Amino acid sequence: MEALAVRLSGLDPYVDGALRIVAFYDTLMRRRVDLPALARASAGLAECVAGIGLRGAGRTIRVGPDGREAPRPPGPVSGTVPVVLDEEEIGTVWLERAGPAGPLDEVLLDRLALAVAGAVERYGPARTTMADPALVELVIGAETDEAARARALRLLGFAAGPVVRVAAVRSPRLPLDQVGGAVCPGGPVKAARIGGVGVLLASGVDRDRFPAGVRAGLGAADRPDLAWREARTALRLTTAREPVLAHAELGALALLAEVPREVLRGNPDVAALVRLAGAPGDPEEEARGNGDSREAQAPREAREALDTLNTLEAYCAAGSLRRAADALHLHHSSVARRVDLIGRALSVDLTTPTGLTRARMALAAWRLLGD
C-alpha cells in the first residue's frame, strides 16, 4: 500500500493522501492497538480533537492532537461516521475542528470507524444485540443436543442457569436490534433473522415495550427449541388489534397450528371466510380471475374485504355489537347489519355462543393459512 501511494503521489495529491491514511490505519490494526491508542493516533493525524463513542458500553474517548484527554466542553463537530459491528450501529467516531472539515476527513473517519469496530470485537466491550444466526439456530434448533445448546448460549453471552426467553418478531420498519433493546433494556438480549422471521433471545421480555408496528409471539416453555415453536405459533395468530401474543394465552387455539393446511382449508367455515375475505394470493381465486376486469375491481374488493375482516374481528374480540361498534367507531346498527351479512355469507348465526365460537375458530385458521 505504501509503495502504491508513492507511485500515485505524482498523479493525484488527494489519492496519495487517501492511500497514506488507509496504510496508516492498516498498520494500526495489524498492531492490534486499543481504543485509546486509536484515538490518540487519529487526533495526531487529523491535528484536531478525535472522539470515539460506544453506545452500549456508555464509553466516550476524546483526545486532543497533543495526545492528552481533550478539555470540556466539546468543540464543534466537523464530521461523524457510525461504527458498525455485526450489522449493528454500536457507536460513532468524530472530529472536532474549529473550521470546515478537511478534504481527507471523510476517509480518515471511515478508516477510524473500521479500526474501532475491529478493536471492540477483539477487546470488548462488544455489547451488540445482533448475533451470529448460526449460533441462534443452534439454540432454537429441535435437533440440537443439550451440550451444544448450552455452549451456543454461553457464546452468545447468557449465563448458565437462568431460563432464556424466546420471541418471534416481524418488524417491517424498525431494525431488530432496536426492538430487542426496547423490550429487554436491562438484561442480555440477542437477535438474528432466520427464514424471514426475527428471533429474540433474552433474559426477560417486557411485552408492553414492543414498539408500534411490530408483531411478536412469545414462547412460554423453558427449553428454547420448544419456546421458539410456541413463539412462531403465537406470531402467526397476531392481529392489528393484538400485535403481541403469548403462547400461554392461546389455550386450545394453539392446537389449530398442528392441523395440516389442507385440512384447515377444507373446513366449510374456513373456506367460507377465505372466499369472503378475498383470499389474496389464493391460487384457486387467481385461476377464476379474468384479467383486466378483476384488476379494476381489486381496490374496491380489497376495501370491502378489509371492512369485513375488521368488523368480524372486532365483533369476535368484543363479544357484543355495542362494544364492537365502540371499537370500530360506528353506530351499533351499522355493525349489526354488517354482522348479519357476514353471518349469512358464512352460514353461521353469529349472535349465538356457538356461532361466535365458530367464527373465532375460523378467523384463527384463516390467519394460519395466510401466514
Image (cartoon, rainbow, N blue to C red):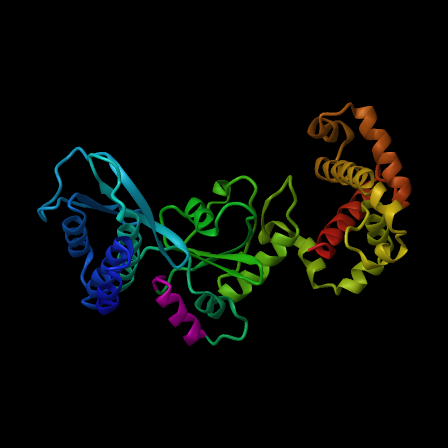
x and y percentages locating residue 115 in the rendered image? 26, 59
Q: Quadrant of the C terminus?
A: bottom right
Q: Report the side of 312 relative to 201 (left or right).
A: right
Q: Report the side of 67 relative to 289 (left or right).
A: left
Reply above or below: 1 against 334. Answer: below
Reply above or below: 81 against 123. Answer: above
Question: Which residue is found at the position 35% from the left and 47% from the top?
Answer: 186
Q: Is residue 151 magenta?
A: yes
Res. 98 image quadrant: top left
Q: Report the side of 318 relative to 298 (left or right).
A: left
Q: Main secondary structure of the magenta part?
A: helix
Q: Quadrant of the N terminus?
A: bottom left
* Any part of residue 123 in sight: no
* Any part of residue 335 in sight: yes
x and y percentages locating residue 15 in the rendered image? 29, 57
Numbered range of the magenta stretch? 146-159
Q: Nearer the viewer, residue 108 or 335?
A: 108
Question: Which residue is found at the position 10% from the left and 49% from the top?
Answer: 67
Question: Which residue is found at the position 19% from the left and 59% from the top?
Answer: 34
Count numbered badges in the picture. 0
Q: Report the side of 84 relative to 25 (left or right).
A: right
Res. 299 image quadrant: top right
x and y percentages locating residue 150 in the rendered image? 40, 70
Q: Is residue 129 magenta?
A: no
